Image (tube, grey):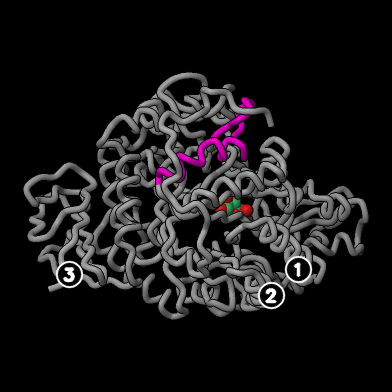
Amino acid sequence: MSSPGPGHVPESVTEPAAPASLPVDADWWRQAVVYQIYPRSFADSDGDGLGDLAGIVQRADYLAELGVDAVWLSPFYPSALADGGYDIADHRYVDPRLGTLADFDALVAALQARGIRVVVDIVPNHTSDQHPWFVEALQAGRGSEARDRYLFREGTGPEGGEPPTDWVSSFGGPAWERVADGQWYLHTFAVQQPDLNWSRADVRDDFLATLRFWADRGVDGFRVDVAHLLTKDLSEPLPSAAELRGIPVDGKHPTVDRDDVHEIYAQWRQVFNSYDPPRSAVAEAWVDRSRIPLYARPESLGQAFNFDLLRADFDAAQFRRIVTDCLELAAQTGSSSTWVLSNHDVVRHPTRYGLPAPDRDAEGRQVARAGAAWLASGGTEPVLDRDGGVRRARAATLFVLGLPGSAYLYQGEELGLHEVAEIPADRRQDPTFFRTAGAQAGRDGCRVPLPWTRGGTALGFSAAPPHLPQPAWFADFSVEAEQADEASTLRLYRRALALRHRYRTAEELEWLETGRDDVLRFRRPNGWEVITNFGTEPFEIGAGEVLLTSTESADGVLPGEATAWLVRPAS
Ligand code: GLC
């Protein structure tokens, strides 16, 4: 990679505030703030319009100043980008467009020197169709060992011309694809992401080698992609899609959240624990809530994402119920809870909170994904309340950052970025868009490269046009603009993360009575209190030293749709 031009250096470069080396701490992840980087859209050092590893190194001081404890890197491995890098052609290498293994080592060194740990994404359910194993599987033909590493089956109907089942892939369209000799392979996601056969020892061993490879390079932890999908029972006769409907809870479903997946994580745990300190892991598991502890157990992955907040409205009762449930779930295993408001798969939370709450069914589940209709309309219908969305998002973020457990932030949320709806069809990348013939816009809108400066090519992201186009309004949300504005979301996040470090305490909370259904208040063991006003009527804060508010407030009164942090000695 070529060296950076001066234009790429952030405006305010400070000396690392964090310790010069990382203390050995096996529990670092329990209450960490983990910042997710989608590498291709974070910062580009070599002017090809695609973010890269050296670009992250150039922004290491930015991350230190933000005050995050760890960075989780979405895949940076070689990939044809059929699914934003989650289609991996080599799990133990770096996409040449993003750098080299030496760049990766430099990245780990730069972050760890600033007290920031590094988590990498492991994608075990599938490979890319460019992976040497899949190339070999196609060449080797029916009945071969190579083909058995994936999930090939004969078709149905005349000459096997119909797929083995009517299953639908996560991105729309059939979950089976036919190859030249007539067999079909299963792909839970894009056509270019064939599912692996996890009943094979060589598949299992290869991932153990991958975990060791990155752990040996100093990686502190792993985020495990669709951790609930690896093992499958495809014995005949295969059930129909209708027979498989519903969220399984018995661990015996043919393809989802099977009990036997935990044999794999027990092996992984042995690898993690062979390091000092043990490597951490967090499961991305879209499973019934009752099943989350299986993944979060110390003998399994140790922590699991809770995605309930991604599907919640800005609503006091919903937030309180989720917090109570998640803390209870974490307590079942001794893990810590995770809090997620945004990631690379969902509409950014300022946008979700700036749109009317989505319809829900009788069980309270969202009928459609929040923001989906708005995205499909190109961002015109319904009308987005931009300022209101950011106001609520800031309040929600401060609420979450006050909770016990670890908070996962997604790049750009510290700028209060909205989702980008205005991406032309010919610039779209997400397979969801193509597999649904544009009916679903997909996830490109939260993956648009970050704005670093108010002006210039790609707003400081790159010296070349960015791989996804940035809208003009991004300039107002740039790091440069927000650094100069004391009331900006960036400055709020920085203050919040610094205070969170100062007030970090035991993983407990106590709910306090507020006399209002739309105001939540909780206290941490050291007297740190969080009050969130989900309503619009102002709320009297009462005694205590206010540390921070998400909106300007005066005279001990918290305005509507705002959060305050304060300290009050325990009475
Ligand atoms: C996970 C990732 C998502 C990806 C999918 C398939 O859900 O978060 O981005 O498309 O897995 O790998």
Dot 2 alpha-carbon crowd within 10 angstroms: few under 14, some 14 to 19, many 20 or more: some
CA distance separating discs 2 and 1: 9 Å
Residue on which the image places disc 2: 267
Cβ atoms at labels 3 and 1 below 8 Å apart = no
Q: Which kind of residue does numbered mark 1 sit on?
A: Arg
Mark 3 residue element = loop
Q: Which of marks 2 and 3 is nearer the N terminus?
A: 2
Q: Which of 249 and 309 is in front in this view?
A: 309
Mark number displayed over residue 512 = 3
The residue at which mark 1 appears reads as 204
Q: Which residue is drawn at 66% across and 61% down?
A: 215
Tag shown at residue 424? none
> Mark 3 belongs to which amino acid?
Leu
Residue 47: where, in percent of width, then height?
A: 62, 25
Residues at circles 2 and 3 in contact by the CB criterion of under 8 Å: no
The disc labelled 2 sits on which kind of residue? Answer: Gln
